[in-house]
Image (cartoon, grey):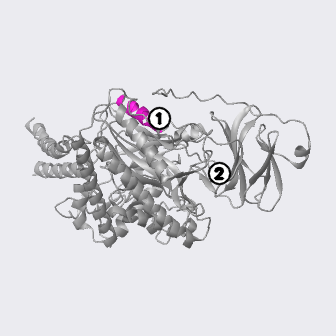
Amino acid sequence: MLIMRTSILLLLTAVILGLAIAPVPAHAEAPVQTETPIQTESPSATPSPGASATLETAPTGLAAGGPARFTLYIPAASSLVIPPAPPASTTYYVLNTDPAALYQLGCQQAQADAARPEADDMLVILDFGQGYSEKEEGKERVWGTWLFSPAWRFISMDTIAAAARGYIQGYWACAKGGDRLTLGIGTNNYGGYGSDSKDPEVREAFASEHGRRWAQMVASVASWNASSGYATRVTVVGANDIELSWNPPNVTRAWVASYTAVNGSRIPYYNFGACEGCPTVPYPTWKGVNGWTQEDVWYAAWGAAAAWPLPEIYLNTGIHARQWQQMSWYSATRHGLRMDFVGAMTQQVACQQRGGCTFSNGQRMDNPPDVGWRQLYEALFKDPLTRQTKLRWSTDIRWMNR
Amino acid sequence: MPRRKRFWIPLVFAALALAALAVPVLAQQAGPGRLEGWAARKAAELEAALPQVRDRAMADSLEGKVAALRYQESLEATAAAVGAVPPEDPCALMPTPLPAAKADARPDGILEGPLAVMPGTSVEVHNQWTGQAGGIRLTAFAGLRLDLPGQGVVVVWEDNSAGGGEYLAPQATGALKIVAERQGRLELVDEQGSILFFDLPARQFLTPAEAQAKSALPTVIPQPTFTPAPQLCPVR
C-alpha cells in the first residue's frame, strides 16, 4: 500500500515537473529555440509579479483549444535554463546615404552571416535619424529625416528609400544558402518634424504627417523588394527609436496612429526605443517624463497594430530589461496579452567607437549583445505572465563610417 | 531482499512518465525549419490567442498584426514567382557611387541645424564644430544634458578613433552653443549669455585666467585609429 502511494506521488511529481520544465528547451549546442504560444490573461486578474508560488492559468502559454485553468506551477522546478543568444547582427546609425555605400554594408552582413551557420535569420535596422521636413518657398514641403551628427543634414524620403534599396541589393547579391534578413527602415521620435515649434499641438500635426509618409515610403520599398524577387530572402519593415524624453506622448501617438492607418497597417514597425524611467514593479499610477504613462508606452510598442517591441537593453545592471518586462506584465494584466518581443538591441560597438558609454551616476550602458539578450530573456522568463521562450533576434548598433 | 527490489517500482513509473512528457517537446523541436513559414506560424499563433482576448484594443491590434503577417507571406510569394537569381559577381548590382559632393561631406567650421539628439546618451546637440585641433581631426558638439537640469555640455568625437568624451560645463547655466573657434579653443555661450571657453587639445573648460593666458595646456594622448573595413566592391 505504501509503495503504491509512493508510486502515485512520484508519478504526480514527475508530471508536474515535466509540465513546468517543458516550455524551456535547453540547447547546449543547437541554438534552435522553440516557440511558446502567447499567453493570455483575463484583464480582471491581478497576478503578482515575480510570483514565487502561484496558481496560474497556463504555464506554457495559451492552448489554441481554449484556456487551461488551474495548472499547478512550481517555480523551484521551472529553473531557468537560458538558451544561447542568437548571433548578433550589425545595426547602423546611418551617416552616409549613398546607395553604393549601403550596398557594401548589406554585402558585408550577408558574407558575415554566410560564415556563421547559425546566422540564418538576422535583423538589421538602418537608423536615419529624427523625422524632419523642409519647405522652400513656392514648393511643396519635402519629408524625410535629419541625419545624426556629425552628418547633420536633411535627407528626403526618396534618399532614404534609395539607401535602403542599396542595402537590400547588397545583401541579396552576397547572401548564401537559406540565410534571411529582416531590414528595418528606422527613424526616431525626437524633435519638431520640421515644424520649428515646441508646441505639442503643432508637433502632433507634423508627426502625424511624417508617420503617414514614413509608412508609405516603407511600403514602397517592401513592394519593390517583392517585385524584384528579393523578398524570398529579405523582409522590409519600419522602425522607430521611441524614447519618452524626446517628445510628449500625444506627438508620438500621432506618428504611430498615422503609420498604422496607412495600408491597413500591413507593414509593421519595430519600436527599438527605451522605457527610460519606467517602473520595474507594478505601479498603475506611474507617470514618466513628458507625461508618458504605461498605456502610452504600451500603445507605441505593442498596442498599435503595426507595433512590435525590440527594446534597447543597454544598461549593464539589467534595469532596462526589467522595465520592459514590467511593460509586458502591464500588457498581460491590463489588456489580456503579454507583449511579444522580437529581440533585444544593444550598443556595445557604438560605445567603443565613442570611447565608452557611462551614465551620470557611473552606470555603464554598453552591454554586449549576448548579455543584453540574456537579460531580457531572463527578466521575461521570471514571471509566467510575461514568459517568452522565443526571443528571435539580437542586434548591436554602431555608427556608420562616413 | 524481495522488499528492496520493490522500491524500484515507483522509480520506473516516474521514468515512464517523464519519457511520455518528453515526446511532445521533442516533436515541437522537430517541426518545420525555423525560418520556413515563420510569418505563417506567427500569424497562426496570434490567431489562436485572439479568442481569449477580451480587451477590444488588444484584439484589434492582434487582428492587424495577423493581417500584416499574412501580407508578408503574400510578398514572399510574389518574390518567389519572380524567381530572381543572385548574380555570380557579388558586386554586379552595386549602384554607381554618388559624387562626393552629393554624398554626405560636410564643410569644416560651425554647423547649425535643428536641435538633435545624440542617441545612446542624454545629450541634446545645439550646434557643432568640425576641424583640426591639436593635430587631430574632430567634431565638437555643444548642447544640453537632458537628464541633468540646466547642465550644458561639450562632447568631442575624434574622427576615425575612439578618442573623445563628454565634458560638463562648470556651472549648470543652460544649454551651450558654439559661437567661435580660434586656434583650437571654442568660444561658447550659455543660456544666460555668459561666455565660456573650451580648449580642444586639452579637452577642458578654461578658467578666465587660463583663457587669458597664451601658454598651451597639456594635450590629450592621441588614440589609435580604426582600421578601415575593406571595400568589398571596388568603385568602377
The residue wearing badge 1 is B96
Residue A339 appears in view: yes
The answer to which quarter of the image holds residue A170 is: top left
Amino acid, disc 1: Thr
Residue A309 appears in view: no
Q: Is residue A95 magenta?
A: no
* Residue A31 in the image, given as x and y percentages of width and height: 31, 37
**Neighbours of disc 1 within 10 Å: few (<14), some (14-19), many (20+):** few
Number of the label disc, if any, that sits on residue B41:
none
From the viewer's side, name the closer residue of A231 and A356: A231
Residue at image location 63% in from the left, 29% down from the top: B225
Badge nearest the viewer, 1 or 2: 1
* Residue A160 in the image, given as x and y percentages of width and height: 47, 49
- Chain bearing mark 2: A
Q: In the structure shown, which secondary structural element does the residue marked by tag 2 occupy?
A: loop
Outermost residue toward the left? B2
From the viewer's side, name the closer residue of A168 and A284: A168
Identify the magenta region: A102-114
Q: In the structure shown, which secondary structural element does the residue marked by tag 1 occupy?
A: loop
- From the viewer's perspective, tell me whether residue A1 is left or right of residue A77: left
Amino acid, disc 2: Ser
Residue at image location 24% in from the left, 64% down from the top: B50
The residue wearing badge 2 is A360
- From the viewer's perspective, tell me whether residue A55 is left or right of residue B4: right
Q: Mostly what secondary structure, the magenta segment?
A: helix
Residue at image location 66% in from the left, 36% down from the top: B163
- Chain bearing mark 1: B
**Separation of residues labelled 1 and 2 (CA atoms):** 45 Å
From the viewer's side, name the closer residue of A150 and A82: A150
Instruction: Examine the rendered structure and indicate whether residue A292 appears above or below residue B194.
Output: below
Question: Which quarter shows the C terminus of chain A?
Answer: top right
